Image: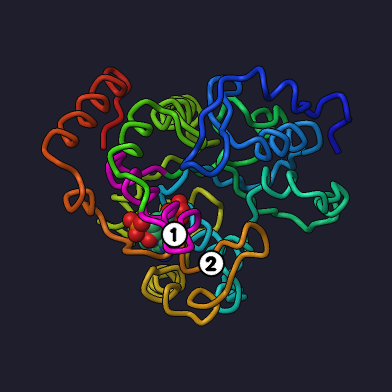
């Protein structure tokens, strides 16, 4: 694991820019992005200990952009004959590495003993990935989502997991302002998305860039694209349909494990990952001014990148 000297002390955290996230815990700015302290510790241990294999697949995403769906899709494609999702939440089938390394229990030997191909996930920005992932032949699949729906989804998610005990919902406008300012867990959102986007243009065989909205609009086309990228082309329409159904919101949301189960860390109910699963829910929350404000930021940030939402 990371050596004691590489683990930041509380004094070091005290010197970093910090922000009280949802009146619940601090997030700290580290190398340009915001994270809870445990994630920074996990990230550093991940970076010092992870040795990529050429056939690893790393899923990557910012928060609330379709991570659960991507994990489920890739689990179905890569492990076509073993329906692990019927009894396990997608976050236990495909683990998020910086969370694993943040716990005290992960032994790097567990990773080296795993059979290939290994399928993992990270929320880390591209710049924070271990060098061995960036420099090996391993593949990365990134998913993003339009920023307005991402923000609304995050607001619901954190209300569910951080505002229990009959607390009022966190003020929507405050969360909107934090999101626009980039001061949120793993933010700034646009910096996260843009770097993966530019890397995917430079190395299309290394990084596949997916959008939640395109998956919704054309699931068959996008699933075939994903399966081919992973080197697991699906044999026919039946297999494509099976993957789409196996990973679908409707199926997963209604499984017993996701209705009543809980993740073994953080007291997070599995149901928190399956809310509405639609495109455009922001319309039910944003004022016209909010929409205009975030659209303007989006336009400025994405200008010249070739990316749009
Ligand atoms: P909503 O809150 O808009 O419903 P993440 O997985 O990155 O945390 O993102 C969660 C969002 O993805 C939530 O969006 C959730 O409902 C949606 N989601 C989860 N599983 C899905 C699936 N299988 N298909 C489509 N959307 C899904």
Of residues 193 and 174, the one nearer the viewer is 174
Q: What secondary structure is marked by label 1?
A: helix
How dense is the environment of label 1, judged by Cα within 10 Å: few (below 14), some, or many (20 and up)? some
Residue at left offset 72%, top offset 35%: 41
Residue at left offset 56%, top offset 33%: 27
- Secondary structure predominantly adopted by residues drawn in magenta: helix
Q: As displayed, is residue 123 above or below residue 214?
A: above
Magenta-colored span: 144-168
How dense is the environment of label 2, judged by Cα within 10 Å: few (below 14), some, or many (20 and up)? some
Task: Report the quarter where the C terminus lies.
Answer: top left
* Colour theme: rainbow
Q: Quadrant of residue 308?
A: top left
Q: Which mark is residue 160?
A: 1
Q: As displayed, is residue 253 above or below residue 290?
A: below
User: Is 102 inside the magenta-drawn segment?
Assistant: no
Q: Which mark is residue 89?
A: none
**Contact flag, marks 1 and 2 (Cβ < 8 Å):** yes
Task: Report the quarter where the N terminus lies.
Answer: top right
- Please tell me which of labels 1 and 2 falls first in the chain: 1
Residue at left offset 19%, top offset 44%: 286
Q: Is mark 1 within 8 Å of ligand 1?
A: no
Q: What secondary structure is marked by label 2?
A: loop
Q: Position of residue 124 (x, y in %)?
A: 58, 36
Viewer can see residue 24: yes
Q: Position of residue 163 (x, y in %)?
A: 46, 56
Q: As displayed, is residue 259 above or below residue 19?
A: below
Q: CA distance from mark 1 to mark 2?
A: 9 Å
Q: Which mark is residue 269?
A: 2
Which-is-in-front pick, marks 1 and 2?
1
Q: Position of residue 181 (x, y in %)?
A: 37, 25
Residue at left offset 21%, top offset 52%: 280
């Amino acid at each position: 694991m990371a050596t004691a000297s590489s683990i930041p002390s509380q004094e070091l955290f005290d010197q970093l820019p910090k922000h009280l996230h949802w009146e619940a815990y601090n997030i700290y700015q580290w190398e340009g992005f915001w994270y809870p302290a445990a994630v920074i510790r996990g990230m550093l241990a991940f970076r010092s200990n992870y040795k990529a294999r050429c056939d690893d697949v790393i899923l990557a995403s910012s928060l609330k952009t379709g991570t659960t769906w991507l994990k489920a899709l890739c689990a179905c494609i890569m492990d076509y004959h073993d329906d692990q999702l019927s009894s396990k939440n997608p976050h236990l089938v495909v683990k998020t590495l910086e969370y694993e390394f943040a716990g005290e229990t992960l032994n790097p030997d567990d990773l080296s003993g795993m059979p290939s191909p290994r399928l993992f996930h990270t929320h880390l920005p591209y710049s924070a990935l271990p060098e061995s992932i960036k420099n090996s032949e391993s593949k990365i699949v990134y998913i993003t989502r339009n920023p307005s729906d991402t923000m609304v989804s995050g607001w619901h998610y954190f209300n569910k997991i951080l505002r229990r005990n009959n607390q009022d919902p966190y003020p929507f406008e405050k969360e909107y302002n934090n999101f626009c300012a980039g001061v949120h867990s793993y933010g700034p959102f646009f910096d996260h998305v843009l770097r993966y986007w530019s890397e995917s243009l430079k190395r299309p065989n290394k990084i596949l860039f997916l959008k939640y909205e395109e998956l919704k609009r054309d699931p068959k086309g996008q699933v075939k694209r994903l399966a081919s990228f992973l080197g697991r082309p699906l044999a026919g329409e039946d297999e494509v349909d099976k993957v789409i159904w196996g990973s679908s919101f409707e199926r997963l949301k209604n499984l017993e494990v996701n209705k009543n189960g809980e993740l073994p860390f953080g007291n997070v109910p599995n149901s928190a990952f399956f809310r509405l699963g639609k495109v455009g829910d922001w319309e039910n929350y944003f004022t016209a001014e909010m929409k205009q404000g975030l659209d303007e930021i989006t336009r400025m940030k994405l200008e010249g990148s070739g990316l749009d939402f």
